[in-house]
Amino acid sequence: MDKVLNITTEFTSGLQLLFGNVKKHKLVLPEAEKPWTLGLLLFWIKDNILVDKDKWYLFLKGNTVRPGIIVAVNDQDWELLGDLNYQIKNNDNITFISTLHGG
Amino acid sequence: MTSCLDNTEDMNNDEEISRLSAEIALLNVELNKKRALLKKKQKQCLTKLDINRYSRQIILPEIGVEGQKKLKTASVLIIGVGGLGCPSSMYLASAGVGTIGLVDYDEVELSNLHRQLLHAQCNVGMRKVESGRLSLNRMNEDVNIVVHDAQLDGHNSLDIFKQYDVIIDASDNLVTRYIINDTCVKAGKPLVSGSAIHCDGQLTVYNYKGSVCFRCLHPKPQSPETVGNCATAGVLGPVPGVIGVLQAMETIKIIVDHPNVLHNSLLIYDGGDCEFKKIKLTNVKRNECICTRNPDDITINMDYEEFCGSKANDKFKTLNLLKKNERITVLDLNELVSTKNPFLMIDVRKKVEYDMCHLPFTINIQLSDLKSEDTRSKLIEKINSFSNMTPNLITICRRGNDSQRAVDELKKYTEITNNVNWIKDVIGGLYEWSMQVDKDFPIY
Ligand SMILES: [Zn+2]
């Protein structure tokens, strides 16, 4: 990779509370030796934009998102795209959705 | 000779009698068949009043006379007569769905009324299914409303589901959502699932024409601390209203066999930003998922509450984090107030809750703010303002869980523990205060 990646991340359905109540984040992912995957992005998010650092466990579990969070790339479930191994492209919009159960 | 003749006549008579009896029996069978057929035809056909009543939707090519007949013969089960079940049942009853089943184990509460519009103020305290039945029949007396006044579990779900064509998940907790999913998979019923909390809503249709099920998306239950509910997180009435109405819409589309039923998709509604987003889900069933098995091999008898680590309701769960001698009752507190013992009392609820109602002798510091050094130094100033007396420190919250967490947090700091006699919380919080000491103190 020889250039930075510009992407947007969105945290919805309550997840924004972990990110200072900001839903949309325009991010610039720095140049890296290995290609940027969603797996790498998760930890980059934890280190760089998660505000409530004590509550990281409400976002991640093990090497992936905690159960109950759905990840979508350009409005498609990441399971359609290889989940953790999906290679991020410039201008991707990555949405994190917390599943709701109330009613 | 006479006797002989008599004999023959008798024999002829007997034969005729049994022949006639057999014929009558056959005709009776035929008659009953025709009666049943007539009843069926009457149900299938639209009366003059039906045509008039539903004309505005029959005119739509998507519905037509055939669609309206399908609605009239359809049966829909709605689990939960709350924020989602009220709007979805209202629209389905009004659209002329023939049979609507309602499942709920709860009573109508005052704090339900802002979003559960089937329940009138005068019905507070009534069984929700009963209040729902009365209201729905007032809207449309032709609809057959069947009530199931029960908590849905792995034992009763299948027998109830079998009687219906479409299932609506309008429940309020994760345990019930797994039970509903598994039963729908076993019984082969489409599942229209909705949820709402805060300003956010979600809608999905599972198990429809080979689509994925809830378990394909959520093979492992999320941990209870990550699941919000309307009682603690709050919910704005129109949000479940929007989702419940959308559930009714997708149900009607399923009944009339509309080509574009929402499936393999998750619809997200963000009421705060007034935004809808549709996420395309995988259409491949998860390996080993319950929905890949033969329905005969599926059993609905697991311990769902243990599986989820939570209860099949959204009621308050009492924690016991502190020792007995670290807690006081509301009666102890009342005593302390009247004896003018020096104490400083912290209400650790959110500011918006404190603004809603609080005890006059309390200060407000949110639980999460206790971690901030700035907040703590202000607290120590307050403690020291008792001059030559060493005060006690008391924490209180809505129901008595966060107040225990606050005691644990405060005890971490020697600059606080060194300057007070003891730190305790109030068992049952403001709810108990209202129950036992001051009935005029608001409950929420
Ligand atoms: Zn499945």
Image: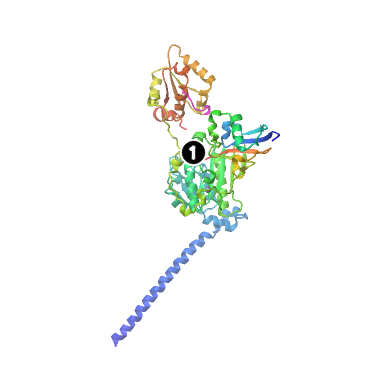
* B60 with respect to B397 (left or right): right
Residue B407, image x, y percentages: 45, 24
Coloration mode:
rainbow
Residue B185, image x, y percentages: 50, 51
Quarter of the image containing the N terminus of chain B?
bottom left
Q: Is residue B399 visible?
A: yes
Residue B86, image x, y percentages: 51, 44
Question: Any magenta on residue B351?
Answer: yes
Going by the numbered disc 1, the residue's amino acid type is Asn
- Most extreme residue toward the top is B388
* A30 with respect to B105 (left or right): right
Considering the numbered disc 1 on the image, is that residue within a helix, a strand or a loop?
helix
Which residue is denoted by mark 1 in the rendering?
Answer: B112
Which residue is rendered at x = 45% and y = 14% of the image?
B386
Disc 1 is attached to a residue of which chain? Answer: B
Mark 1, Cα crowd under 10 Å, few <14 / some 14-19 / many 20+, is some
**Residue labelled 1 has its Cβ within 8 Å of some atom of ligand 1:** no
- Most extreme residue toward the right is A2
Label count reads: 1
- Most extreme residue toward the bottom is B1
Q: Which residues are magenta?
A: B346-352
- A102 vs B213: above or below: above
